[in-house]
Image (spheres, grey):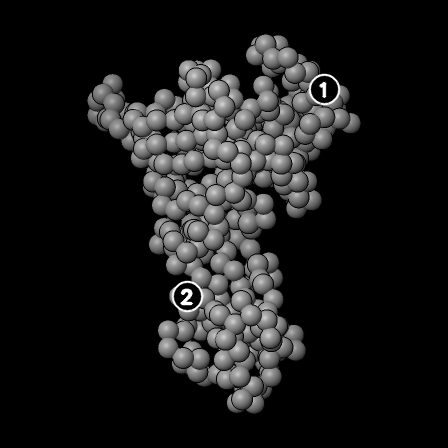
């Protein structure tokens, strides 16, 4: 795993909601929740938490933050002197940014934060916190006049009260335009570089691919995959594909490239006669890429593009849950945003 020392460990953590048991609502029954979750979070790293709606992402974040008392299992801070803390005190090392905070009114960010700082008895000043999240010039702007990006930064400033070692962010990119997302992403990376361990949940998979160091996939309350992006790809059998485009002869089937290969035709771009992807379970070695090139050019085709296409987060999520991207309902990247590694003839991988 990327990052520094472990700072948080979850061992077999289970929490289930108590819901009314109709027609006797005073009798509660166990409802949805999270089941036997194991997780380790490292300082200075950003862990992306993804899963379909209802998978338990918010429940897991709230359980780590102590808003839900877990039924079984163990949550503990580790490293240095954290293990000596009782859980109530340990929670002061954890900051939570909820999905929605309604910042409105004529108060300013400075005034809103001052009230929270006073209630919490923290030594930090509102000015320090607001400067940390890039709001130095907006400290005295009325809340009603702030953009959604500024509101999200204010929520983050609240989560940073007490200088937590662990930061939990629930859908922090909601409502942000691409420019604000990029700025927020840089801010999170700066926090991670300072040693903060960050767990971020988001529906925007395209955005998540740009800045997370590791990945945890939840499905129906269970952790179905966890590790670095490469580790998760291998565990789920999602190997890189080849993206090939050109003119002239087009192979009639995947069989033109040997056994165990599947081919998907794609709408060609301007100036191309054909475009397709090739996939095999173990990926593509340099020699195998040469074989593809020779098979096409030997039959009279002309290749204008040959790229290694990395699995996207929606591919990993689909492989982990058995659901398509449409069924999951996530924001996904367009074909133009698919992460690729360009390969040239003579390059060996």
For the point 75% across and 26% down, the residue is 136
Which residue lies under the disc numbered 1? 127
Spatial CA distance of label 1 from label 2 is 53 Å
Is label 1 in a helix, a strand or a loop? Answer: helix
Residue 52 vertical position relative to residue 137 in the rendered view, above or below: below
Which residue lies under the disc numbered 2? 282
Residue 280 horizontal/vertical position (percent): 42, 69
Residue 197 horizontal/vertical position (percent): 54, 33
Q: Residues within 10 Å of mark 2 (few under 14, many from 20)?
A: few
Residue 212 vertical position relative to residue 324 in the rendered view, above or below: above
The quadrant where residue 176 appears: top right
The quadrant where residue 15 appears: top left
For the point 29% across and 26% down, the residue is 72
Q: Residue furthest right?
A: 137
Taking the image as drawn, is residue 276 in sight? no
Nearer to us of marks 1 and 2 is 2
Q: Is residue 225 left or right of residue 120?
A: left
Q: Is residue 259 left or right of residue 275?
A: left
Taking the image as drawn, is residue 160 in sight? yes
For the point 52% across and 22% down, the residue is 93
The quadrant where residue 109 appears: top right
Pick the residue in front: 256 or 62: 256
Pick the residue in front: 53 or 231: 231
Pick the residue in front: 1 or 225: 1
Residue 20 horizontal/vertical position (percent): 27, 25
Q: Is residue 42 left or right of residue 175?
A: left
Is label 2 in a helix, a strand or a loop? Answer: loop
For the point 34% across and 26% down, the residue is 74
Q: Residue furthest front?
A: 80
């Amino acid at each position: 795993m990327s990052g520094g020392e472990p700072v948080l460990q979850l061992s077999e953590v289970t929490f289930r909601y108590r819901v009314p048991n109709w027609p006797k609502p005073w009798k509660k029954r166990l409802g949805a929740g999270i089941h036997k979750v194991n997780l380790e979070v490292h300082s200075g790293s950003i862990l992306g938490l993804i899963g379909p709606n209802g998978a338990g992402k918010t429940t897991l974040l709230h359980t780590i933050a102590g808003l839900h008392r877990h039924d079984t299992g163990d949550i503990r801070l580790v490293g240095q002197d954290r293990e000596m803390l009782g859980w109530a005190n340990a929670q002061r090392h954890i900051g939570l940014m909820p999905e929605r905070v309604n910042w409105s009114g004529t108060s300013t960010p400075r005034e809103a934060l001052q009230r929270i700082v006073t209630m919490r008895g923290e030594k930090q000043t509102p000015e320090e916190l607001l400067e940390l999240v890039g709001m130095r010039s907006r400290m005295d702007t009325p809340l009603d006049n702030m953009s959604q990006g500024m509101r999200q930064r204010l929520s983050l400033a609240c989560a940073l009260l007490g200088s937590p070692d662990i930061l939990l962010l629930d859908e922090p990119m909601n409502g942000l335009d691409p420019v604000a997302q990029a700025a927020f992403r840089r801010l999170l990376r700066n926090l991670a570089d300072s040693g903060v361990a960050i767990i971020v949940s988001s529906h925007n998979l395209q955005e998540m691919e740009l800045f997370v160091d590791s990945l945890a996939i939840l499905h129906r309350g269970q952790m179905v995959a966890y590790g670095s992006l490469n580790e998760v790809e291998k565990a789920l059998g999602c190997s890189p594909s080849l993206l090939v485009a050109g003119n002239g002869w087009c192979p009639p089937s995947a069989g033109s490239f040997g056994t165990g290969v599947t081919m998907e035709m794609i709408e060609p771009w301007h100036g191309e006669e054909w475009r397709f992807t090739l996939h095999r379970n173990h990926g593509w070695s340099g020699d195998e890429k040469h074989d593809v090139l020779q098979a096409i050019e030997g039959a009279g085709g002309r290749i204008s593009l040959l790229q290694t296409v990395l699995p996207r987060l929606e591919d990993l999520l689909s492989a982990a849950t058995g659901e398509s991207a449409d069924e999951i309902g996530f924001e996904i990247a367009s074909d133009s945003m698919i992460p690729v590694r360009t390969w040239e003839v003579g390059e060996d991988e």
